[in-house]
Amino acid sequence: MFWNIVRLEMSKTYQRLLPWICLGVVALIVLAISTALFLYNMLVPGYHNTSSLTWPGSFVFGLNFALAIRPGTPMVPML
Amino acid sequence: MIIITGIVFAQEYSWGTLRLWLSKGIARTQLFVAKGVLAIFTVLLIVGVCLLSVALLSLFFSIQLQHKVHLEQLDVLQLLLAYLRTIYALLPYAALTLLLVVLTRSGIIAVGGAIAFSTIFEGLLKSLAPRLGSGFMHIVFYLPSGLASTLSSQNFALAICRPRQAHTSPHRRSPCLGSRSTHSSSSPWPSGSSASKIWPRCRPDYSAGDEDIAAGRVVSLEASGKVRVTVGIEGVFEGVLCCIA
């Protein structure tokens, strides 16, 4: 019975298009910020902090980004 | 995450479907645990999407900046642990939202309250605590953001290059670190200090000077003997941890 409820809740939430759009927005924000950092790194002389852009340091960036968006600002369209 | 949790729980009250569920003989506990599973799955998805995005991008950036991708430097076990740590750090906010939903039965109040707590209240308390005394500083460490900062500082183990050679020169910098010059060769981590206890995997052979940037972590040795570690990735996430060296 419990797993039936879980399955129902999952389908109720994730069969809609909006959560996936919101996840796409999250991915786009990550891409935009990373690209902006990369360009800043390339354009500003004397600034060479590439560790958060390159493998494997970028994973720390991704995890910290996930923590930073804890209020779920990109999920606002779901309201 | 707060918003999704708040909406998923509060909709049951506003639409009246919770009464329908309960009238069918489903236990209240089962219903709440099922929704908790949904909240955890949402957190898994959000963190997973963030990781996947940076993984794909870093392949491109590594080729552009280093002309090579050091795939062997990724510790998969550490990555998995960091993933779980991040999810764990996000759960207190989900629990707070759930509490507010149950207490107020309103999605707006629950979501607004949780966001206000995570952005305004925690920020205010963190900035005021040093002025109020050392006792209040201890309270800050037990706030969800303090937990998140502590757990995310452990994630920096991911950014530490695994040695490819048995012996490297102390003056030779790791490619994980930026191209800034080192100022001294003395380690700011005294053996057995609280700093090295909190970050046991954060470069025990750390050879930077007063200030350096190691994978977005700014470490500075203050005149008072305190090691100040700013956990921040270019302004996206910033938390300050202080510990007495």
Image (spheres, grey):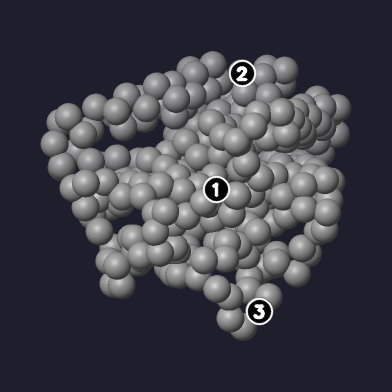
Label 1 in the same subunit as label 3: yes
Circle number at residue B68: none
Element under disc 1: loop
**Mark 2 or mark 1, which is nearer the start of the sequence?**
2
Q: Label 1 belongs to which residue?
A: B180
Element under disc 3: loop
Q: Residues within 10 Å of mark 3 (few under 14, many from 20)?
A: few
On the image, the x and y values in percent for residue B137 come to 23, 41
Q: Is B132 on the left or on the right of A8, as rendered? A: left
Q: How many marks?
A: 3
Q: Is A77 on the left or on the right of A11, as rendered? A: left
Amino acid beneath label 2: Ser
Marks 1/3: CA–CA distance: 22 Å
Identify the image quadrant of residue A13.
top right
Marks 2/3: CA–CA distance: 62 Å
Q: Label 2 belongs to which residue?
A: B14
Q: Quadrant of the N terminus of chain B?
A: top right
